[in-house]
Amino acid sequence: MTRRALWLAGLLMAFAARAEVFDTFGFSPRATAMSGAMTAEAKDYSAVFYNPALLIRPADSTFGLGLNFFRPITEVTQTDSSKVLDCTYCTPPDTIGSSLGIAGPLGGKLHNRVALGLGVHLPFQRLLHVDLPDPNRPFWYQYQAQSERIELFAGVGVKVFDWLQLGVGVQVLANLVGPGAETQVDLFSKQVKVRQVDSELQTRLAPNAGLVVQPISRLRFGFVYRGEIMVNLRIPATVDLQGVGTLAFTIEGIAHYSPHTFNLGVAWDVTDELTLTLDGSYEMWSRAPSPYMKISIDLSGDVLKALGLDQALDLQSDEQAPGFQDTISGKLAAEYRLNKRFSARAGAFYRPTHVPRQNVPGTNILDGTTLGGSLGLGFNFDDPLEIFAAPITIDLAGLGAVVLPRETRKEATDTVPSYTYSAKVVGVSAAVRYDF
């Protein structure tokens, strides 16, 4: 298969998914080992997520396939014994999946001027999981079903000048919407006369754009903007009770929300062997919608109206704004290249929580300020079977994080008791990469 044919096949496959697990756990073991401080430093396919302007940085095309495992170890402890705490969602699932990335320059007169890239995360168990927990059940906002979705970033990088690179990309997601379900029932004959469902996955896009400024050969500044994106769920249904009235109800909700994000990073090649990186992120969580389901029910009809019952069963669930706050987080990392075959990496990060204390009724969102660190290494070797002309690279990474303890003090009239919570997150990532 020619290089152009490989690119075309990859791009056609890519526009069916979206990405964001990359931000929580990292895209590629190198990025995970460096705690995601990649805004000015990504130099392989991971640039499609961290900064599409850096796609032009590698001189050759690069392909990688990885496996990821991350486990949240959570603790939720009830402090009020007078009530029962429903802990259905107190233990979020593991994040288990694979990642795939490809990037490289175009040929001809655009060689070393324009490059394309894509990255995909494929969860092992479910391609998409939408979970809207009950407000009276505590759940972990960052970890409950957030990783259970296909994730994609695709982009293009352009070298405008030797010191200036620009990049644009797209996130792809889908909304589950449509007319919904329609049924018609004859209560007297007890027959269902009409039954149909019409819903669809509608494509949803969000931008991913970045730039890199390199005033001197060893110093790079990067800036990235990623647009807000989410899954909109709307499932309406109507039941026509012939001769009686019509029952209409609608279930709505928003899941897999990611805020407008602005990243600023700097990378400094201190020597030929050592690179230091520093990243800062501003996330606009104050715009986040409620993570809870909204339901509305309407019963209407001439017979019911005549009896004065047309509004007796109408209802709409309460909707409470989550009150999230904008956050500023930081990451720093280092990579030391012992020789052309072996590299060692380390990183650390600080992520403040955007979730306020859950002391009020009707909300139980678990999250806390998170401190973490990571380690990793990369090494390459020549193919012993001589199938591949260039060396094969293996990247490995491990991550550990602590969600600092918090306490929720519920009012005496609340049906949910008071509780404390904290968590640890551990994980490993491995990938094989080939530059061709």
Image: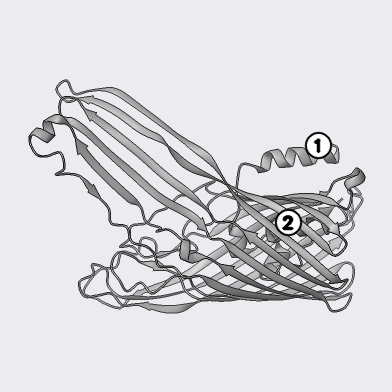
Residue placed under numbered mark 1 in the picture: 5
Q: Kindly identify which numbered label has been placed on residue 365.
A: none
Q: CA distance from mark 2 to mark 1?
A: 22 Å
Q: Is residue 50 shown left or right of residue 110?
A: left
Q: Position of residue 318 (x, y in %)?
A: 28, 57
Q: Is residue 418 shown left or right of residue 280?
A: left
Instruction: Tell me which colouring the rendered structure shows.
Output: one colour
State if disc 1 and disc 2 touch (CB < 8 Å).
no
Label 1 sits on what residue type?
Answer: Ala
Residue 399, by quadrant, is: bottom right
Depth check: 86 or 103 in front?
103
At horizontal 88% and vertical 62% (from top left) the residue drawn is: 162
Q: Position of residue 80 (x, y in %)?
A: 26, 77
For the residue carrying disc 2, how many other residues have a C-alpha within 10 Å: few (<14), some (14-19), or many (20+)?
Answer: many
Q: Is residue 68 visible?
A: yes
Depth check: 344 or 303 in front?
303
Q: Position of residue 127 (x, y in %)?
A: 54, 46
Residue placed under numbered mark 2 in the picture: 52
Depth check: 160 or 4 in front?
160
Q: Against 302, is 409 above or below?
A: below
Q: Against 31, is 101 above or below?
A: above
Q: Please state which of the two labelled residues, at mark 2 or mark 1, is closer to the viewer.
A: 2
Q: Position of residue 254 (x, y in %)?
A: 43, 52
Q: Secondary structure at mark 2?
A: helix
At horizontal 65% and vertical 50% (from top left) the residue drawn is: 170
Label 2 sits on what residue type?
Answer: Pro
